[in-house]
Amino acid sequence: MREFNDLLVWLRFRNSLTALPQGTANFGFATQGGSVYIGSYRSPERRILASSLTTFTDEAKIALDTLSGRATGLFSPSLRLGVTGLSRAGKTVFISAFVHNLIHGGRLPLFAAQKSGRIARAFLEEQPDDAVPRFQYEDHVAALVNDRLWPDSTRAISELRLTIEYESASGWSRMFSSGKLSVDIVDYPGEWLLDLPLLGKSYADFSREAFEMAALPVRADLSKEWRALSAAVDPNADADEMTARRLADSFAAYLKACKLDERALSTLPPGRFLMPGDLEGSPALTFAPLPGLSERRARSGSLQAMMERRYEAYKTYVVKPFFREHITRLDRQIVVIDALQALNAGPGAMADLERAVTEILACFRPGRGNFLTDFFSRRIDRILVAATKADHLHHESHDRLQAIVRRLADRAVARANFTGADVDVVALAAVRATREGTVKQGRETLPVIIGTPLKDEKINGETFDGKTETAIFPGDLPDKIDAVFDVSGPDHRQSPDHRQSNDDPAIRFVRFRPPKLERTAEGVTLSLPHIRLDRALQFLIGDRLA
């Protein structure tokens, strides 16, 4: 029965919802919105989401694609690693450092295959998907190493194949293993992933949730103009293109304001409103939520009918293909988050980040297959939640940062009813931009970090020029992390009127330029320095090189 449970099959019928028993994993069938699935899930919420994402035809295509990939993998083993995170979390830097350290033999003491000397070499090859843009590794490394500039953020999906030649630690494995593993790294914006829950929501549901979120204290002032504009519109009025454009532009401006450092909010669907790409100006991106909608069918030719049709087009032509063609093909996943930026903004931003991670986890297909099901269906069996920019803290606070991320991930896993995959957390810096030191302040010795802050970064009224190396005391993360998530406390900072109190530790993180790389006596540039990148590599691919 296990093989059948793992292989989800959808059939098309027009029946009413038939619910399965709740609780632990159950087997059976259910229908919703004209879709029937056969399989098992631990919660009705996850079951309903999954049944909304694909049709029987989609599943057939996924199975054929997986079968083709597995057949090729019998002779050339490969692993598809997804790298996602919200904008400016450090996805591009992580991938660049991942590849650079393996190609150049970086210092990776916790990466077993490298530490034991079993990796012969790592090199780039042509990626298997010709229709997906290549991750421009060479350009990104040049920006980091030569210009000491952080590379541009991920704006669309891209891919890179890194092949590792190695010797297995097991004599038995050496007899049957080719000693080669290709890691296909798939880079995609987390904002796009947060669109996937829309597939299970009607336009009325989407509108209601959008206005509920916009009314939260942390968002209310940013959404005021859009909500006022929406309140003046009659959804039943005749459809008008200029009205639709004004509403869409105002809604997009509100979402973009939420992303600024002062708020650092994370849950901002639709993601393409932030990163439209070649869809900018298309009807599929010219819609917005409307207030006070019921589930009744909209009048034909009305503004509501226009918005609803475009919302459905967005799901059909943007969201669904992304899930089918990319997310369902992943074997491993790392979710990169900028917890420090959220900590800067306060508990409201942390709560929003937790909500985003919950929705991201709910979109994956977790689990472990077996010999039969692996030929037809991929499952993500390991997920790493990585808090980046650990180099912006003294190492004394790294355990606290990791504890904060552990709390966030555990709560997100519980809320998403996420089971079947190993989930781990790590506080890392894929590229370490600072070093540590101490300074005397009166009789007190303070631990500091030393680096070159980015131009126009500010702290305590001082604006940095982007050239001067500076020692900064970033503050200590709290011993008790409950306050980090407490939005009901006296200093929840959910609006501009709520700022950090004088009783709290001075916590303020600034961004630094990439480091100037060291050179050997022979003039060879060393690999990019890092913090715990080796631990991330061990969790994500270490077992495949054992």
Image: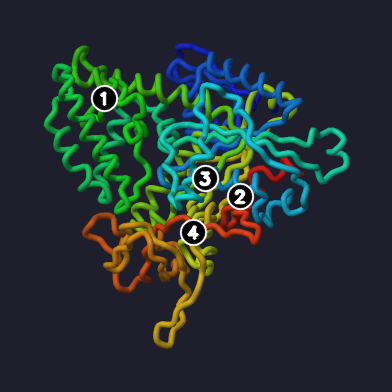
Residue visible at 17% across and 17% down?
239
Disc 3 from disc 4: Cα separation:
14 Å
Which of 246/406 is in front? 246
Whether residue 269 is visible, yes or no, is yes
Eye-nearest disc, 3 or 2: 3
Residue corresponding to mark 4: 433
Mark 1 or mark 4: which comes first in sequence?
A: 1
CB under 8 Å between discs 3 and 1: no
Which of 153/386 is in front? 153
Vertical relation: 141 (above or below) 286: below
Residue corresponding to mark 1: 286
At label 4, counting other C-alpha atoms closer than 10 Å, the crowd grade (few under 14, some 14-19, many 20 or more) is many
Question: Label 4 amino acid?
Answer: Ala
Residue visible at 61% across and 25% down?
128
Screen quadrant of the N terminus: top right
Residue corresponding to mark 3: 141
